[in-house]
Image (cartoon, rainbow, N blue to C red):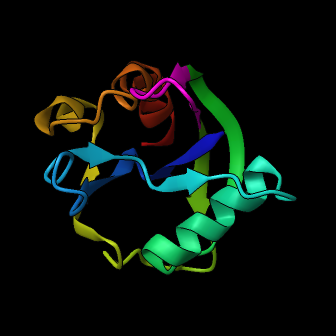
Amino acid sequence: MVVGAAIIVAGRVLACERSAPPEVAGRWEFPGGKVEPGETETEALARECAEELGVRVAVGARVGRDVRMAHGRSVLRVYAARLLHGDQPEALEHAELRWLSAAELDSVDWLPADVPIVPALRPLLAASA
């Protein structure tokens, strides 16, 4: 299982540009990663956000549906999240970070697994604006 965070602040969601590996560098994703043995999905997501972005998050409801990853062995599950205690994300493992409004969601080249999640974000972004 792979988990991703749709970190939403004031009607915008955080998008992260991959820097590696070469076959996906320059494509965009929601931060997250693999659930390790003994972790819950929310624990894994909190850990991944700390490692990748240097932030603490509160994990909320699922966003969209489960998406089978390109290699077919894993499923991506995305959760809404919010930053805790005024934390500001840093690109610790990504080339760039962008806050995207609903109107800007199509302005980046999303990784295939993240594409099906994008439409489910539009109402969440509108509600948080």
Vertical placement of 72 versus 88: above or below?
A: above
Q: Is residue 101 left or right of residue 35?
A: left
Front residue (pair 52, 105): 52
Q: Is residue 111 left or right of residue 81?
A: left
**Residue at point 24%, 61% (across, down):** 20
On the image, the x and y values in percent for residue 27 come to: 19, 45
Q: In the rendered structure, which segment of residues is drawn in magenta?
A: 67-77
**Residue at point 62%, 80% (across, down):** 85
Q: Is residue 45 left or right of residue 19?
A: right
The quarter holding residue 96 reads bottom left
Res. 58 visible in picture: no
Front residue (pair 100, 1): 1
Count of numbered badges drawn on the protein: 0
**Residue at point 66%, 39% (across, down):** 1
Front residue (pair 73, 50): 73
On the image, the x and y values in percent for residue 10 come to: 42, 52
Vertical placement of 47 versus 102: above or below?
A: below
Q: Is residue 78 magenta?
A: no
